[in-house]
Image (spheres, helix red, strand yellow):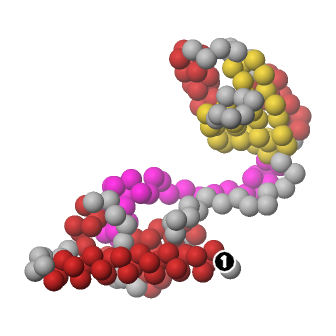
Amino acid sequence: MPEVANGRRALSRLEKMINAYFCIEKKCGQKVARDRMMSRNVLDTYDIRLLSALQQDDALSLQCLAELVSLSASQCSRRISRLKAKGYIQKQVTLLNPQAVGLDVEAFVTVSLDNHTPDSATYFKEAILKMSPVMECHAITGSDGDYLLKVVAKNQHALSFFLMEELMKIPGVSQIKTALALSAIKSTTALPLSL
């Protein structure tokens, strides 16, 4: 449970900073408003608690969220709307179990392009965006390849077909290297808000 302890320490530090900020403002005789902090794109303790709870279970009711973060349901609703508007919440989705829907193979594929012109990179990116087996695509450096893909498939035959008949046929792709995932030691979508 070191993650929980680290998270609590980070929340505690953040609470102290926020309290110090408000104490300084009060001593100076200025009007204090939490919305001022929000207009500066600073997350307060309640925002962090709310985002952490939503990352763990987005299906929680507003009432349940309110109890978890010690706010009213209407305050939670307003904060969620503001966090969406400010871009902290990109989208809310349902995560599926890949094996339950028949996607038993996961692979990481390094892709090298034969030339590095803006046109070839753009063409590659456009082609990748249309390929549903590609879950993630990252431009990389410090490796043998130019891009790292996370790919899912029903089985090894389907993966092989995708690699040889779709990925390798993108103009400009010169080499691919594939590593099959045997098991996932850690796989999360929750960002570490305590950092």
Q: Position of residue 147 (x, y in %)?
A: 67, 32
The kind of secondary structure element at disc 1 is: helix
Q: Which residue is mark 1?
A: 2
Residue 69, picture quadrant = bottom left
Can you give x and y, in whole percent of width and height, for residue 178 in the image? 82, 35
User: Where are the magenta residues, as a range?
Assistant: 77-105
Q: Nearer the viewer, residue 55 or 34?
A: 34
Residue at image coords 75%, 30% = 144
- On screen, residue 66 above or below 95: below
Location of the N terminus (image quadrant)? bottom right
Residue 2 in view (yes/no): yes
Would residue 172 be counted in the magenta stretch? no
In-front residue for pair 80/102? 80
Task: Find out whether residue 81 is within the magenta segment.
Answer: yes
Crowding at mark 1 (Cα within 10 Å: few <14, some 14-19, many 20+):
few
Residue plotted at (72% across, 24% down):
112
Residue 146, placed above or below residue 150 = above
Q: Is 61 positioned to the left or the right of 27 in the image?
A: right
Q: Position of residue 123 (x, y in %)?
A: 58, 19
> Where, by quadrant of the figure, is residue 176 drawn?
top right
- The total of numbered circles placed on residues is 1
Q: Give the residue type that dot 1 points to.
A: Pro
Helix, strand or loop for the magenta stretch, by majority: loop
Q: Residue at x 41, y 75 (%)?
A: 14
Residue located 84% across and 55% down the image? 183
Q: Which corner quadrant of the image does residue 19 belong to?
A: bottom left
Regarding residue 154, the answer to whether it shows in the image is no
Depicted 73 relative to depicted 183: above or below: below
Left or right of 102? Residue 173 is left
Residue furthest left in the image: 29
